[in-house]
Image (spheres, rainbow, N blue to C red):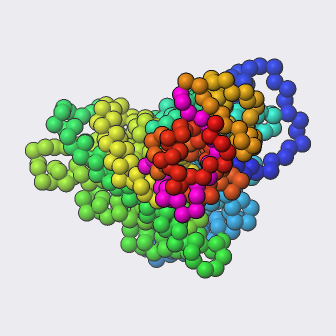
Amino acid sequence: MARILPQMKSSIPPIQWRVSPTGRLLLLSVLVGIVGGLGAQVFIWMLDLAHEWLLVGITGYSPPGIPSEGGHPEERIGRLGLWLIPLATTLGGLVSGWIVFRFAPEAEGHGTDSAVRAFHHQDGAIRARVPIIKALTSAITIGSGGSAGREGPGAQISAGFGSVLAQWTGLPPDERRLLMLAGVAAGLSAMFRSPLGAAVLAVEILYSSMDFEARALLYTMIAAVIGYAVNGAFVGYEPIFDVDPGLRFHGGTELAWYGLLGILTGVAAAGLPWVFYKAQVLFRRLPGPRVLQPALGGFLVGVLGLALPQILGGGYGWMQRAINGELTLGLLLLLALAKPLAMSLTVSSGGSGGVFAPSLYVGTCLGAALATAVNQLFPDVGLSVEAFAVVGMASLFSGAARTPMATMFMVVEMTGGYGLMVPAMLAVTLSFLVQSRMTRNAEYPSLYEAQVSHHGDSPVHYEEYVHKVVDLIHAGEARMPKEATPVRLEELLLMGTSIPVEGTGRSIVLVEVREGAPAAGIRLRERPLGSGISILNILRDGVVVVPGPDVAVQEGDRLIALLTADAYDHASESLELMGPTS
């Protein structure tokens, strides 16, 4: 978990700020919000241009659009039918893959995950070229028919600007991280006209267990509002999807069906990350240059599109048609299965685009399919396909991304379905719980690989954690400097310094996990060393590993631990003391 920081240099001298950190971050968040709103418009223009040149220009095919963006409601098929679709998707993958791997390899895949990784492991540092490359390649990928969403590039444009702006103005790393999150919120808010949901998503998506980066919320809210306002000046402020504003649920009996929807989408959300990352593993095992893999993914998506053109592109028009109840039950179920595969072929191969919109697509189809099936089996029930499509949209992504609060707000804002808040609360909660339970020991528990479970699992908060440990030491009578670092602490313990914590009967010591130890390979949540040992940090091959619940101890690990003599005796088969106990 060592941090790898990009080398970012600038000839611009840093600004000498005369305001408080809060004041300057608020000011810069406004600027980031403006760029987020303008960036969304530039990206959509690029996307429309790529769509006209590649998918429409080569194949003559155009999927249905959404009314709020001036799209036509019906799909259009050219005189040659669908046969040239694989050519367009392959060309898009080839061009975008070459650009990404030639100029900015970190821009491959879905951009929001890159921002999460930058927060945890790069002090919020994003190279200035990445947002430009991400916007260009995502427009080409999606515009040619690649099955991906536009939220990743939208978020990364303004997140990258926030990161670079923080560097130019001489902000420290902790403030750079916050300004980058403000950029994520601004881009998402402008792209989806969802200021509240975007502000919450930016602070919730970092963690997979209902943890939040609450200190950033003030700045994400400001940036999201500004991004929404700037974007709205160009396209208006109506929700993206056209939904009956009077839509609402009708009592407790109907809530039971929404509960079932939450369970079903939770199960689907557990499988979605597995499909996505297994496809990524398969692509990376293929022989040959990686630069060609997005072209292969594009070709396979194009072949799938010959049978199901509904899976091409972002799919917003087809989502609107599902909300309108215009798709049959069989087609809805087929699309719910095919869209994850198409998304994985596009993005897991190295193509550029987001996973938010495809996930909403799957949830919309499942929600509409459940209501349609119930109405066919039990005509007297009379469920609203429109309402279930909207709630399904929210509940699936809340589980797959582990972001129930933000997703609920975003979908309500994107559809204007405020009367569905109560059933949405039920469905997203159940989806989150089911998905979390089903993936608790999974290799790929979430769509966002860079997420960590809790604050304590993030290197960002490690120094804060260490200072709390030092404060604990100072609560006793141990004499230890405040500026102690984890490595310095190890040196002191190796010298034979055992640090008693008065009033607890425990001491801080350094121990090593023995070769062949029974505890090796067992996750800390299972307490492999017993309940009387608290591990403060793990030193592994010169790298500090945060002792989160999903971390497993390994042979040769050095543990700085808080324990009693009895606890050490119980764990003596696994541990070897590196210094005296007291």
Residue in front for this viewpoint, 438 or 135 = 438
Q: Could you tell me which residue is drawn at 56 percent across and 45 percent down?
A: 547
Residue in front for this viewpoint, 13 or 51 = 13
Residue 281 included in the magenta stretch of the image: no
Q: Is residue 383 above or below residue 76?
A: above
Q: Could you tell me which residue is drawn at 25 percent across and 59 percent down?
A: 328
- Going by the image, does 253 lie left or right of 111? left
Residue 522 included in the magenta stretch of the image: yes
The quarter of the picture where the C terminus appears is top right
> Given the current orientation, which residue lies at the most extreme bottom position?
287
Q: Which region of the structure is painted magenta?
A: 504-527
Whether residue 78 is visible to the viewer of this picture, yes or no, is: no
Q: Is residue 571 above or below residue 555?
A: above
Where's residue 352, x and y in %? 59, 59
Where's residue 12, x and y in %? 88, 39
Q: Is residue 265 above or below residue 209?
A: below
Where's residue 453, x and y in %? 50, 44
